[in-house]
Structure formats: structure tokens, C-alpha cells
Amino acid sequence: MPLPDNLLWDEYLNKVISHVKFKYDRKEIKWELEEHMEDMYDDFISDGMNEEDAKKAVIDCMGDADEIGKELNEAHNRILGNVWRISRMIAIILILLSILPVFVTCLTVIFSIFSSYSYSYDKSRIVSCVEVNQTEKIDDMYLKLEEVILYDNDCVELHYKTWYQPFSGSVRWTFDISSDYVTDNLGTEYNGYSGSSSAGIISKHNTVIEGFPKEAETLIIDYDYCGRKMYFEVPLREGGKV
Amino acid sequence: MSRKKETIIFIVIILVLGFWRFGGGQQLYFSPEKVMYACEKGLHYGPSEKVLLKKQMGNRAIVIGKLNDGISVVHSKRSLLGMWKLGEGSVTGYWKTVDDVEAAYSSRFSLIYGAVKNKDIKTIEIAAAQVKDGELEILEEANCNVDDDGFFYANTGDYYSEDDGVYFRIAYIYGFDENGTLIYSYSY
């Protein structure tokens, strides 16, 4: 039911909200109190009271404006209110700024998980493929050596992926297992390697090292650099075909 | 939901997204020293025992750290909100002192710096030069004392050039013992 004249209520409500120091809540408090008062007003009218009496009765029922105002001020703490307001604003800005990067990041993660390794030579030339699936960690980077492939031209191809632990604070560089750290059970030194790496949160790498001796049985990766160590021993002749 | 709970959720969102967008996630750091330590971790060496030198020029900075067998050299650049990120171009990073004296000249930072392996060398006479069209021109000569960490440096004038045909290098290094006797020499 529409209200005939709101002056009385306005005065009352303004007195209540004048006690609330967190001014950003005043409008909402006023609106909520007004709703409540309107409900009471409707009840009084339907009980047969005339409009003027109903308006006054509502105010009587609501109680002392100063008292209510003080209670509401305590409930709507100004410090918490300001922290809430500012943090909400910053959070919204950050969410807006992050929508596109989050989408792109999700896509790259999905792509890096489901993308497969490239093979440097035709698969028909594979003599042996050993699934290693061993994970090592240096600093805050994980390296998982997934498979090692021996081709009929004595080339060895390493398939491995690297990723950083969440919230890692380090500058992220591409990491390669270089031939400096590769040897075999005969102690062969390998000079030079080739390969490629994919970008993304999970980076996939393939490294090719040439000249694995026909008599050698085991490929050894012995990374020992500035106190960081990783060790893999792969029985290369024991693998199957892809 | 109460305002308190909402505030906690907002603060968590700010911390997580803020770190991701402007902190480690974007590889931004609070100082050039922090960039150096983060770079060392990413390149899997160090961390430096201490900072030997930090030189800031405008919105760029170079930090040199002490490693047990060399130095760590990382340059950085000021970025968003006064944070720092790794500078463009190649990074020297881990520089193992192999020779009795190792030295470099950074024209961008107007700085000659180096490390000494031979503990008998107490002072260094060194020259920065530029090479243009195959001609070496000495830009500045400097005398430096080697500190207890085996580190030395000298500031130079501003000779920085973005001309692709010019590159900068050390022209010569002379190392002297405490009596002033020449015990090491190198020249281009």
C-alpha cells in the first residue's frame, strides 16, 4: 500500500542513521528499516487503523531512534567496514585484471598436459624405448624424465618435462639436460646435443645426443652443478618399441 | 555471509591474485637484490653469500654477489609499482673465477668490475675500451684495490652506446702484490 506522507518516517530514519559512522552503509540501513516499517504499516492498516495513526504506531513500535542508531553503529563497525570496502574493490580489480590471463594460463596448462612429445626420427627407427617416469627436484623446479629412446642410428632421445612448484619465487629459465651431464656405463663423454622445449607452465623437452656406443647398456644422467644433483640410470637396451 | 568472512575472502583473493599478477607469478620483486637471488635460484647456482656491489642507474640496477668460487652478476630493471624485474638481454649470472683475475666492463652501468683468484694480488690497474670498426680505443683507466673477498670495481664515465657496431671490453689488466710488484698481466 502506498504511503501518504513520509516526512515523519524520514525524520525518524535520518535520526537513526546519523549515528552510523560508516556512511557507506547508511543508505542500505535506511532502506532495510523502511521496508520493515512498511510491513508494520500494512499490518496496522489491515487491522483497521487509519493512516495517520498507523504511521505513528509504526514509529512507536520501532523504539527510540538514538538507541537504535547507536546499536546499528556498533554492528556496522567503521574500521571493518572500510577494510571490507577497500579489500572488495581491490579484489574486484584484480579479478578483472586476471580473467584473460587465467583463461590463457588454463589453456596452456591443458595444452602442455595433453600435448605429446615430438620424435626426432621416424618411429620405425626406434630400437628401444624405456619408460622411466622418475621425478627429481632441484631448487624449486621439478624434472620428470619420462622416456628415453634409442634409435638405430645410435642417437638417444630424452623426453622430459619441467615445471616449477606453485608460488615459486625464482626467475624461470628454460632447463636442458645437456650432454655435459650424460654418460653411459662405459664412461663415454658426449659432446653436443640438440633439442627443443615447449613453453608453458609445464614445459616439455626433447634432447638428442648422438653416438651412443653399440656396446653400451646403460645411459646415465648425472647432473651435479653448484651443489644441485639429479641422477638417472636407464637400462637402454631393455626397452620395447613404441 | 558476515562482513568479517567476506573481508577474509577478499584478502585471500588479493594475496593469491596479487602474487600471481604482480609478484612471483610475473617475476617481479621488491628490490634488485631479490631479483639476483631469484635469478640464481632459477639458474640453479648460489645463493650468493653476500652482495658485493649494487649500483643503480636510473631505472636499472646491477647487483654483484659473492659466490665461493666466483661472482654472481645480475642486472634488473624497475617495473610496475616500483617493483623490479630481470633486465633485458643476456645475464652474466654465475661467473666462476678461473684465471688469476677475471674482469668485465659494463658500459650500461659505467662500471668496471672483477674478481681475483690469486690472493697475492692486492691492487689492479685496468682499462675499459670500446671497439669500433675493429679499432680498440681506450676509454678510461682505473686503479682498484682488491677487497678481502677478492672483488674490485671502479666507476667510469658514461660511454654507453646502442650502436650495434660498437662493443665494449677490457683492454688490459695488471695485477700487483702488496709491494707493488707486477705479478699478473693481460692485454687485448
Image (spheres, coloured by chain):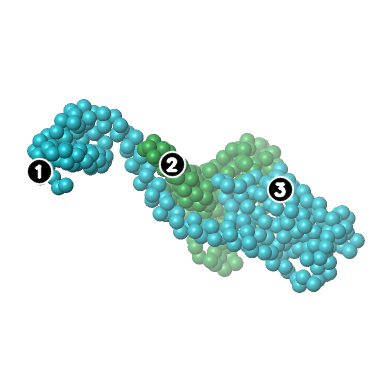
Chain colours: A cyan, B green
Task: Please name the amino acid that badge 2 sits on.
Answer: Ile
Q: Closer to the observer: label 3 or label 2?
A: 2
Q: Quadrant of the N terminus of chain B?
A: top left
Number of other residues with Cα within 10 Å of mark 2, as a class: few under 14, some 14 to 19, many 20 or more: some
Asked where in the image residue A177 lies, by quadrant, the reply is: bottom right
Asked if the residue at tag 2 contacts the one at tag 3, i.e. Cβ–Cβ closer than 8 Å, the answer is no
Q: Residue furthest front?
A: A48
**Mark 1 — residue?**
A5
The image position of residue A153, as x and y in percent, is: 83, 69
**Mark 2 — residue?**
B9
Task: Please name the amino acid that badge 1 sits on.
Answer: Asp
The image position of residue B5, as x and y in percent, is: 41, 37
Distance CA(mark 3)–CA(mark 2):
35 Å
Q: Closer to the observer: label 2 or label 1?
A: 1
Above or below residue A40? Residue A128 is below
Indicate which disc, 1 or 3, sits on the residue closer to the N terminus: 1
- Mark 3 chain: A
Number of other residues with Cα within 10 Å of mark 3, as a class: few under 14, some 14 to 19, many 20 or more: some
- Mark 1 chain: A
Left or right? Give the position of B122 relative to B81: right
Asked if both marks, 2 and 1, belong to the same chain, the answer given is no
Which residue is pictured at 53% across the width and 66% down the height?
B164
Asked if the residue at tag 3 contacts the one at tag 1, i.e. Cβ–Cβ closer than 8 Å, the answer is no
Which residue is pictured at 54% across the width and 64% down the height?
B166
Front residue of A38/A14: it is: A38
Asked if both marks, 3 and 2, belong to the same chain, the answer given is no
